Amino acid sequence: MRTRILGAVFLSIAFATGCRSFSSRKKPTLAPGPDKTGGASGVAVDIQERVDEDPSSAAIVETQVIKGLRDAGIQVRAYGKPLHVVMGEAKASFAGKSELYGMATSVYSATVSLRVIDKHTGKILKAASADVRKMATEKKAAAHGALRDAADRAMKKIIDAIPKPAPETKAKPEAKPASKPEPKKGAGKKVVDVPKTKAKSVE
């Protein structure tokens, strides 16, 4: 009986210690979510990219979209609670061979479709797509070039649907009270002209 009581006591102490150590662990912090009423918002980007029907890890379109957003002054969030999401699909397909200035080239056609979605309502604010054909001596260069140009064109069609951050207003420095000019030396003293007298000559 005594052994059971001691065992129960040790278990309760171990449980309490474990709870304290678990509760004292520092929780991971995420980037704060945007203020719904603040105007400026963060944007997450998620693009599915394929080249010749195979998934591509090069992220050509996603990189180009993020660059366009940042150039427009829009914050891109990798985690946290973004207010908007730019989602889309990108596909580049081999379109044959061609010749340019006597050189054999590969031709790729690319299609990029983008959508701006309000994260809180799920509403699609704007959608657009663009098609581009590009040629290069190497297949990879042609495919990536077509995807990059198509991403730029599609971005220009949807960028106005994403709220831009309000410009920061700098507080004007307080005006210093005008200092009174220091009086000049001799100011306030009356100057009396002394009449000139002719010296008399003594014979």
Image (tube, helix red, strand yellow):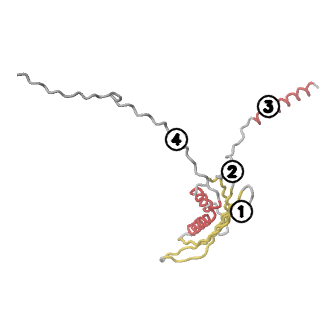
User: Which mark lies nearer to you, 2 or 1?
Assistant: 2
Tell me what residue is drawn at x 82 percent, y 31 percent. Answer: 16
Q: Where's residue 180, x and y in %?
A: 43, 34
User: Which is nearer the N-term, disc 2 or disc 1?
Assistant: 2
- Distance CA(mark 2)–CA(mark 1): 19 Å
The secondary element bearing badge 2 is classed as loop
- Circle nearer the viewer, 4 or 2: 4
Look at mark 3 in the image and give the residue it sits on.
17
- Rounded to the nearest whole Å, what is the CA distance between mark 3 and mark 2? 44 Å
Q: In which quarter of the image is residue 89?
A: bottom right
Disc 3 residue crowd, few under 14, some 14–19, many 20+, Cα 10 Å: few
Left or right: residue 78 versus residue 186 is right
Q: Say which residue label 4 marks.
A: 173
User: Quadrant location of residue 6?
Assistant: top right
Residue on which disc 1 sits: 124
Label 3 element class? helix
Q: Which amino acid does label 1 sit on?
A: Ile
Q: Are marks 3 and 1 in contact (CB under 8 Å)?
A: no
* Near-viewer residue (83 or 151): 83
Type of the residue with mark 2:
Thr
Which mark's residue is nearer the viewer, 3 or 1? 1
Q: Nearer the N terminus, badge 3 or badge 2? A: 3
The C terminus - image quarter: top left
